[in-house]
Image: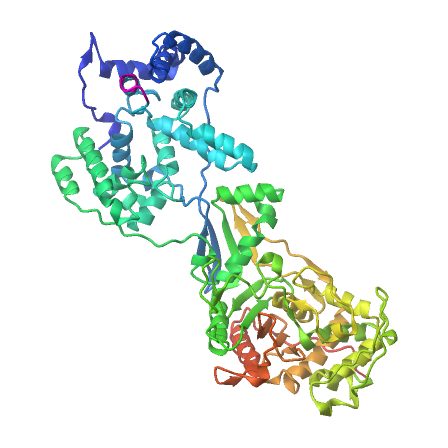
């Protein structure tokens, strides 16, 4: 039934004019002449608050009229804070994985809300909503008289329009950045004072002039609070009954509206509050019957219905993401950097808090699942002998798009944690984006020495000495630093690695001293520059070390940085900064780019192709052979193991996809992975299992299946 056409209950008349008549006339006043009439009304309000002296009425009236006239005439209905949604890709289609919000709200249109809810709201909150012009005189008089009699404020008179004004002012206050100003504005919006009530009344009259009844009721239903962080009838219906607002039953609608006045006392989240909710629900149902919104039969059936919520569990944040929780958290931390949300970080934070954004990630959930399963199988989070961590992160060469971001722990940023099986630390990222301080990279760092070797015109066939020996610090060139002190005495991984080595063979076998000999012929600062050109930086934000030991991997770097570096080789020398946000859709439905693509030439193509040629041997016959997917796709890569084998790496790339796998100690311990068995495999080999499984899956996707690398520069391999 259409609410405006239904009669309200007719109260007794006052004098020669019925209250119903009077209300309708006040509706006219509220829309056109309300300000003049309001002067008299304000005096009565002051009297109700200023007892015991009736003399205050005239003084208060004069004050109130002046205050009333000084107020703005209207406010606009704002966009309300809503849920933000993060999407990833599955089977080539975007799927939502997480909702993030300050306020759990989904703004919906008129037709998306059940008529039961609309009728219950009018019956329970503002019976004469369709007759008055924003201020209900009868309710005001009743409240004022009651307050005078009881010498205090014992009842209110807020119409739906007035409640909408109050809630709008509260929401505006909550969006203020400055904490001090926010507190003042919020207090002004909720203070139980005459000034606040007068302001609400005038602004409510202004709303009635500016907006239709339909718009006002819809605005209220989208802004009202339903307990905790739940706002608006759509989110409330989903939370408490697991249905949309358009699909609630009659008793469910009345139960929802029963909460709006006192959500903490009638909340359906707690069975202890069901009785209180039912009392108010049944009262609203009675009013709906009396107003003609429902029949007596409907009323009886509804009040006989027990309170039976069907609660949806908490869903706010990446902790409750359906998948890729660490990727979700990383993306959320990037929000203040996204230009699509505004020109400054402060503006972006406010925009995100207001919500209704859709963030689309580059993560491929099909590949994410494979990597996660490989990590779980090979590096179980339940390991108790030491703090075992493991991660896999994949980046597209030439774009920087992150396809996989997984680790062997459950994501938990609640503070409670789950012992050793969960963490909030993203092993793949830098510390300032929720990551660790990084991990020593071991021999994976040798790719930067190899790069600079070719850039200085040296060749792959040159021979260097791999014999273990001390190197005087003064024998190393560093244009950006000076070295002194005792000689540097590096060791090889095995005693039999001494003697002469070609660069190709030394790369395949990852001979430490051979690479130190190479570094001795180069500028260590230029080796660092080669690494930086490929996006490498310390995860803790400190500058990269340039000591001779850095050439064999003492810098602590995040796996994502190493994935981006090896992807540079896959892109024939072009480095693209890793990105995870593909696009952003704003509250207005307009699409904007996500993270900007930042690509630069890290080296000449002939250098990149020669580095790739050298690293192909690592995966064919060298230290990385056990990780080769052997699926016909050309692949290049480099292993890395620290001195105590407490950190193990394998990074590799095809022409279409790069992958970095790390396995190691997360707490600074030096548990040697060669001396421990993980999931039936020697711990040193764990990285191979994870890499091989994940890369093989990536290669099966035509979009990610790579091709042949360009051939090396003949002048650099002779």
Q: Residue furthest right?
A: 474
- Above or below: residue 493 compared with residue 265: below
- Above or below: residue 28 compared with residue 2: above
Q: Residue furthest front?
A: 52
Residue 687 in the image, given as x and y percentages of width and height: 57, 78
Q: Residue placed at 66% from the left, 77% from the top?
A: 642
Q: Residue placed at 74% from the left, 86% from the top?
A: 505
In the drawing, does residue 356 fall left or right of residue 245? right
| Residue 327 in view of the camera | yes
In the drawing, does residue 378 fall left or right of residue 707? left
Question: Within the image, what quadrant is residue 428 found in?
Answer: bottom right
| Residue 249 in view of the camera | no
Quarter of the figure that contains the N terminus: top left
How many callouts does the rendering have?
0
Question: Within the image, what quadrant is residue 575 found in?
Answer: bottom right
Residue 271 in the image, given as x and y percentages of width and height: 25, 49
Q: Residue furthest bottom?
A: 496
Residue 259 in the image, given as x and y percentages of width and height: 30, 39
Q: What's the magenta bit mostly, secondary-structure-wise? A: helix
- Above or below: residue 238 compared with residue 600: above
- Above or below: residue 47 compared with residue 551: above
Q: Is the image coloured rainbow, by chain, by secondary structure, or in one colour?
A: rainbow
Residue 550 in the image, given as x and y percentages of width and height: 74, 72
Quarter of the figure that contains the C terminus: bottom right
In the drawing, does residue 178 fall left or right of residue 203? right
- Queried whether the magenta region covers residue 546, the answer comes back as no
- Per the rendered image, the range of residues in magenta is 145-152
- Queried whether the magenta region covers residue 149, the answer comes back as yes
Q: Residue placed at 37% from the left, 36% from the top?
A: 224
Q: Residue placed at 44% from the left, 29% from the top?
A: 189
Q: Nearer the viewer, residue 442 or 693?
A: 442
């Amino acid at each position: 039934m259409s609410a405006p056409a239904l009669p309200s209950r007719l109260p007794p008349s006052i004098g020669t004019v019925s209250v119903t008549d009077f209300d309708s006339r006040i509706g006219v006043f509220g829309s056109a002449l309300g300000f003049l009439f309001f002067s008299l009304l304000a005096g009565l309000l002051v009297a109700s608050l200023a007892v015991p002296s009736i003399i205050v009425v005239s003084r208060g009236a004069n004050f109130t009229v002046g205050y009333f006239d000084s107020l703005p005439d209207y406010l606009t209905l704002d966009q309300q804070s809503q849920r933000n949604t993060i999407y990833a890709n599955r089977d080539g289609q975007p799927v939502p994985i997480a909702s993030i919000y300050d306020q759990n709200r989904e703004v919906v249109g008129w037709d998306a809300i059940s008529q039961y809810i609309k009728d219950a709201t009018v019956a329970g909150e503002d019976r004469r909503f369709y007759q008055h012009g924003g201020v209900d005189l009868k309710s005001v008089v009743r409240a004022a008289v009651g307050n005078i009699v009881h010498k205090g404020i014992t009842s209110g008179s807020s119409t739906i329009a007035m409640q909408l004004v109050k809630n709008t002012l509260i929401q505006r206050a909550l969006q203020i950045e400055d904490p001090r100003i926010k507190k003042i504005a919020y207090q002004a919006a909720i203070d139980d004072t005459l000034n606040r009530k007068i302001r609400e009344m005038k602004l409510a009259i202004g709303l009635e002039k500016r907006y239709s009844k339909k718009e006002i009721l819809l605005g209220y239903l989208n802004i009202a609070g339903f307990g905790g962080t739940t706002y608006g009838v759509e989110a409330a219906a989903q939370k408490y009954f697991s249905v949309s607002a358009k699909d609630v039953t009659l008793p469910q609608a009345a139960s929802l509206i029963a909460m709006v006045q006192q959500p903490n006392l009638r909340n359906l989240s707690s069975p202890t509050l069901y009785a209180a909710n039912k009392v108010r629900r049944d009262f609203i149902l009675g009013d709906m019957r009396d107003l003609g919104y429902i029949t007596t039969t409907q009323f009886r059936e509804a009040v006989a219905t027990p309170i039976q919520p069907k609660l949806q569990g908490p869903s706010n944040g990446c902790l409750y993401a359906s998948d890729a929780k660490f990727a979700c958290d990383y993306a959320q931390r990037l929000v203040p950097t996204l230009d699509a949300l505004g020109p400054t970080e402060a503006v972006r934070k406010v925009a995100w808090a207001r919500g209704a954004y859709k963030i689309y990630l580059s993560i491929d959930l099909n590949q994410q699942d494979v990597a996660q399963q490989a990590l779980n199988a090979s590096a179980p989070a339940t390991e108790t002998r030491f703090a075992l961590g493991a991660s896999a992160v994949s980046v597209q060469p030439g774009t920087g798009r992150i396809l996989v971001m997984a680790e062997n722990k459950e994501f938990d940023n609640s503070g409670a944690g789950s012992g050793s099986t969960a963490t909030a630390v993203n092993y793949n990222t830098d510390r300032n984006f929720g990551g660790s301080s990084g991990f020593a990279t071991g021999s994976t760092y040798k790719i930067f020495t190899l790069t600079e070797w070719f850039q200085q015109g040296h060749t792959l066939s040159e021979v260097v000495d791999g014999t273990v020996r001390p190197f005087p610090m003064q024998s190393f060139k560093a244009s950006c630093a000076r070295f002194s002190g005792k000689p540097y005495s590096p060791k090889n991984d095995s005693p039999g690695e001494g003697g002469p080595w070609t660069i190709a063979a030394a790369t395949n076998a990852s001979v430490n001293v051979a690479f130190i000999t190479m570094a001795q012929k180069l500028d260590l600062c230029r080796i660092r520059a080669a690494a930086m050109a490929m996006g490498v930086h310390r995860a803790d934000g400190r500058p990269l070390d340039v000591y001779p030991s850095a050439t064999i991997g003492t810098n602590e770097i995040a796996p994502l940085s190493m994935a981006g570096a090896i992807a540079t080789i896959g892109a024939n020398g072009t480095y693209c900064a890793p990105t995870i946000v593909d696009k952003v859709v704003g509250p207005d439905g307009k699409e904007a780019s996500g993270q900007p693509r930042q690509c630069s030439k890290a080296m000449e193509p002939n250098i990149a192709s020669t580095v790739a040629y050298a690293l192909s041997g690592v995966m064919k016959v060298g230290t990385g052979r056990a990780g080769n997917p052997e699926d016909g796709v050309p692949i290049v890569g480099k292993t890395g193991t620290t001195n105590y084998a407490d950190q193990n790496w394998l990074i590799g790339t095809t022409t279409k996809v790069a992958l970095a796998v790390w396995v190691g100690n997360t707490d600074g311990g030096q548990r040697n992975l060669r001396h421990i068995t993980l999931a039936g495999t020697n711990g040193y080999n764990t990285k191979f299992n994870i890499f091989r499984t994940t890369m093989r899956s990536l290669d099966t996707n035509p979009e990610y299946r790579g091709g042949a690398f360009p051939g090396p520069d003949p002048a650099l391999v002779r």
